[in-house]
Image (cartoon, grey):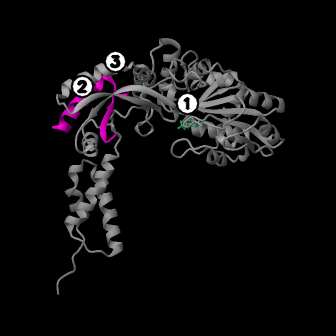
Amino acid sequence: MTDPPRLPSVDRVARAVAHVGLPHPVLVRVTRQVITALRSTGKIVGEAEVVGMVRTRVEHLARGALKTVINATGVVIHTNLGRAPLGDEAVAAIVRAAGEYTTLEYDLETGERGRRGALVEELLATLCEADSATIVNNCAAALLLILRNLIGEKRKQVVISRGELVQIGGGFRVPEILEASGALLREVGTTNQTALTDYANAINEHTALVLHVHRSNFWMEGFVGSPSLADIAALCREKGVVLVDDLGSGLMRKSLPGAEMEPGPADVLRAGADLVCFSGDKLFGGPQAGIIAGKAHLVASMKKEPLFRALRCDKLMLAGVEATALSYLQTHVPTPVMEMLAVTVEALRTRAAAIVAAVGTDRVTVVESQAQVGGGSLPQVRVPSASLEVRGPDPQALAKRLRLASPPVLGYIANDKLRLDLRTVFPRQDAALAEALRKALA
Ligand SMILES: *Cc1c(COP(=O)(O)O)cnc(C)c1O
């Protein structure tokens, strides 16, 4: 009688997939998981098969490493690609803060403990034309902190229009954040129509605040109506309740075509909101952070919450936001997001033509295209752009070859052709893009 086939040794399998380049203990861990799973199913497989299964898993893991890519999708604030790329100054500030000791909470004059984020808070308050401002990890955290701080034992209700109970990107649903904060949802109006009287009828002694959520990632057309923020603010003042505006994105420059009507944080506060919150990246163009601006006593009260400590941002984020705020207030160097949105189509066409020449095949042509702001900002705005369009039999296969290039190049497919939109490609990446395309077409 022969022995039944045994599962191979963990170490042998781990060594067989060493070429993937992950640390040995990780390979051992994955191998153990695979072998344990096989054992529990009682399936008998040979070593080659186990190695194959482990390889599939570790290759998948290796692809999960944070890698830089060339974004030729034409989506400027691309959620899956890390939203806003930072400006040179912000990057330099983060690198400096990362590798050195800093005055994070230290006062050089007195030699004693200083106030964390003191300057960045002033810069943000200045930009938002607010009494006061502060900063936490992201805008979802900012909203959570605001809600937790404003709801009390007897005042738990948050009044919000049904047209604003929205989902913003993956994992951010306004009703769920409200629930997580312990607030009770008091919905008013309907999806498409909410009147000022709906708000007025809902506000009572149990109302903690009125929440206005900016429809940042969609727009509604047709039989749609809601009161202006100024009217809601006047009502809230009359009733003595706080008005909070979750703006999501912090547009600082109205020069963007199509964004003339988009409110910025200062507009929202001027209209009468007591607090506004928005992301530090998106249109603001810095690191992801949650910026809160508005009435001084409200901001001060939030900073006393134990939750504030849990949500506060670290020195790297503070350094990046400080540099980004200074770029608006002092150096006037546009953020990469604003710069990408402002480049003329002619400039993009010129670059595209140079890339076509460098690739040297008649399969690639320059076409007009439409870029998007993305990141749940200005969904109705289409930005005229220029793309490379590649003719050929299998655009999906070509797209994959480009994704697997080094650096990876990400485009999109339109009318069964691969397109690479230059609006979201940094000019410094043009040569690498041309090279990747030339190889992929060879
Ligand atoms: C994007 C967005 C958020 C969430 O911001 P994060 O920085 O991703 O947490 C919240 N509210 C609105 C209206 C948004 O657009």
Residue 204, magenta (yes or no)? no
Question: In the rendered view, does 32 fall on the left or right side of 185?
Answer: left
Label 3, label 2: how far apart the Cα atoms are: 13 Å
Q: Which residue is mark 3?
A: 347
Quadrant, the N terminus: bottom left
Q: Which residue is mark 1?
A: 249
Q: Which residue is mark 2?
A: 355
Q: Residues within 10 Å of mark 2 (few under 14, many from 20)?
A: many
- The overriding secondary structure of the stretch rendered in magenta is helix
Q: Kindly indicate the quadrant of the structure image that contains residue 96.
A: top left
| Depth order, front residue of 349/135 | 349
Q: Please, what is the three-letter code of the amino acid marked with disc 2?
A: Ile
Secondary structure under the numbered disc 2 in the rendered image: helix
Residue 287 image point, x, y percent:
48, 30
Stretch of the chain drawn in magenta = 415-442
- x 29%, y 21%: residue: 351
Q: Please, what is the three-letter code of the amino acid marked with disc 3?
A: Ala
